[in-house]
Image (cartoon, rainbow, N blue to C red):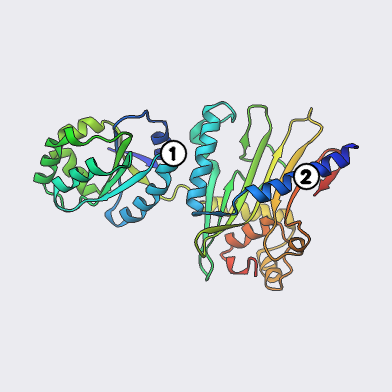
Amino acid sequence: MLKSISIDEFLQRIGSQPNGNVWSVLVVSYSDSDELVEELKDTISIFTECDVGVIYTKNEVSITVDKIQKYSEDYLIIWNFEDWSDRNWRTFDQMRSRLAKKRGVVLVLSQKSVKYMFTYAPNIVSWIGSRVYTLAKDTELLTKEERQRKLLTLHEWSGLSDREIIELAELRQLPPDPEYGEWLVLLGREDLIGR
Amino acid sequence: MDGKSNWEGLCKQIQQRTLQSVPMTVDSAKVLRSQILKCLTEACDDGILKHKINEIYTLLKLEISNQHCKNIKNLSGGELNFKRRRDLPHFERFDGSWFDFGILLDETNKPAIIIGFHFEIRFLDDNPIKFLRFDLNLPEHNNQDKGKRFHISRWAGKFITM
């Protein structure tokens, strides 16, 4: 059973890692990988304060290994292992002595590819240790309950209803306080902000 | 200079300096959130904030609304707290002062633009200043013409807004 982790917790862990070739694995569905890699590229660089490179693997292990060696960035995100066979993973495992980066690497894997890694790349798995996580999605977003609580607070503060706020905004008579903008976002009427 | 003129002069200086030095554009709301998360995490590690680091991200929330032609997000740190109730979730400093904030970002175009924010820090009872509040009002408001879209407020016996 893999530990589930939010992206915030993952970033905090990466930020506290010592300098060295530290590898981690994030497990997400393949369809979510593209968006996650984009987000990780922007945010890992904030927490590591180093440049971050991205490798989209093809079905050729030696090319991937060459890229890991040649890329100048100290931290790498490697993804798209979907088509890697047992032979690919075994080869990757055998070439592990060439897999060194100054700071670290995160592998973005699907459930299918992480099973392949666990089965056919035992040395890399040993190297990664416990740093294999499934990603808990959308933990940074307001929950339905938190949204309702905010709306209730805004109602009590202003004495106005959601309908009245929308009418005032449509008439361009909404007070300027930033909380009213937040209110419109909560109502899904961001089109009325700053018209 | 008396206390009030001291305060007013200070406010003008802070406003001018803030408007000149604070970027009003960011890459994205998620990037800004990560930057704030890192800053607050380091503050925890350094003992400046009285939180465990896993409490930080539970207080930092994004609200996304893109049902219309605009893409506006709200980044909040702590709960809305108009009555300054200490039992509501907030950030707390080592000296007992406590704060919350909200930032509105328009991601319709790149880079994203900060179109409004509020930040308020409240001090302990023995401090003559009870709270300090920074606001950036929503755009296209009358105050914008008067150069007051960004303003600072404090309470020290009476309410003063600059």
x 67%, y 52%: residue = A153
The chain letter for the residue carrying disc 1 is A
| Picture coordinates of residue A125, whole percent (x, y) | 21, 34
The amino acid at mark 1 is Phe
Give the class, few, some or many, for how many residues have Cα within 10 Å of label 1's Cα (few <14, many ≥20).
Answer: some
- The secondary element bearing badge 1 is classed as helix
**Residue designated by label 1:** A47
Quarter of the picture holding the N terminus of chain A: top left
Q: Nearer the viewer, mark 2 or mark 1?
A: 2
Residue A177, picture quadrant: bottom right
The chain letter for the residue carrying disc 2 is B
x 55%, y 32%: residue = B43
**Residue designated by label 2:** B11
x 29%, y 39%: residue = A105
The amino acid at mark 2 is Cys
Which residue is at the far left?
A: A87
| Picture coordinates of residue A156, whole percent (x, y) | 71, 54
Check the image and report above or below for A75 versus B47: below
